[in-house]
């Protein structure tokens, strides 16, 4: 007895096997299943990066507007304190930024070259404030550096993508403004 049956049955089996192998049905679904995780990861990474840039720019704009009150001497001539300045800055924050997470540091320096570009030690690695930040806006003609730091929570993305640079899934954002105060009358 033949192992594969009759020659006609063998030809039929080979023809069926060839049609299954040559069939293209379902190939698009399999290709999409292979590419979809990478495509999804790319979309999520792009969205997270866009959100982070938007929040950073919003923080920069808020700091620039608030620094104007120091540069014109308005804060100094009205006797504004650190907490009052913080309250004024928080009023210009958008609703997605929490005021209690912001740390403000305003210092008078001797010249523009001393402003530095290092990260101030105002928060710990978890994003909690370790220093209240100084508030020394100076007098007319003073060079002032104003730094605002904000630990922004970010979500981990697929395939190990993460924008956090602190513990607790947060990214430390910092906005700095260095300026000379205008010659205002005291």
Image (cartoon, helix red, strand yellow):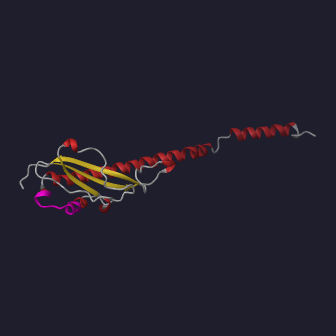
Nearer to us in this view, 89 or 128: 128
Point out residue 86 in the picture as x, y percentages from the top left corner. Answer: 23, 60
| Residue 164 on the magenta span | no
| Residue 86 on the magenta span | yes
- Which segment is the magenta one? 75-87
The mark total stands at 0
Point out residue 20 in the picture as x, y percentages from the top left corner. Answer: 71, 41
Quadrant (top left/top right/bottom left/bottom right) for the C terminus = bottom left
User: Is residue 149 shown left or right of residue 76?
Assistant: right
Residue 79: name its quadrant. Answer: bottom left
Considering every residue shown, the one lying at the far right of the view is 1
User: Is residue 40 shown left or right of residue 34?
Assistant: left
Main SS of the magenta part reads: helix
Residue at (47% x, 51% y) in the render: 157
User: Is residue 23 shown left or right of residue 39?
Assistant: right
Nearer to us in this view, 36 or 123: 123
Quadrant (top left/top right/bottom left/bottom right) for the N terminus = top right
Nearer to us in this view, 43 or 127: 127
Residue at (27% x, 59% y) in the render: 132
């Amino acid at each position: 007895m033949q192992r594969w049956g009759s020659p006609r049955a063998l030809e039929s089996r080979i023809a069926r096997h060839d049609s299954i192998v040559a069939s293209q049905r379902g190939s698009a679904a399999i290709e999409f299943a292979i590419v979809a995780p990478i495509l999804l990861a790319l979309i999520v990474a792009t969205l997270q990066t866009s959100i982070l840039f938007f929040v950073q720019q919003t923080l920069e704009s808020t700091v620039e507007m608030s620094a104007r009150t120091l540069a014109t001497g308005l804060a100094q001539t009205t006797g504004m304190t650190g907490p009052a300045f913080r309250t004024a800055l928080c009023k210009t924050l958008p609703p997605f930024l929490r005021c209690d997470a912001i740390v403000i540091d305003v210092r008078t320096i001797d010249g523009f070259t001393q402003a530095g570009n290092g990260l101030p030690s105002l928060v710990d690695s978890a994003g909690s404030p370790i220093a209240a930040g100084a508030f020394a806006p100076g007098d007319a003609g003073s060079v002032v550096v104003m730094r605002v730091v904000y630990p922004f929570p970010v979500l981990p993305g697929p395939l190990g993508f993460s924008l956090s640079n602190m513990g607790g899934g947060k990214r430390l954002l910092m906005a700095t403004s260095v300026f000379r105060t205008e010659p205002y009358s005291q």
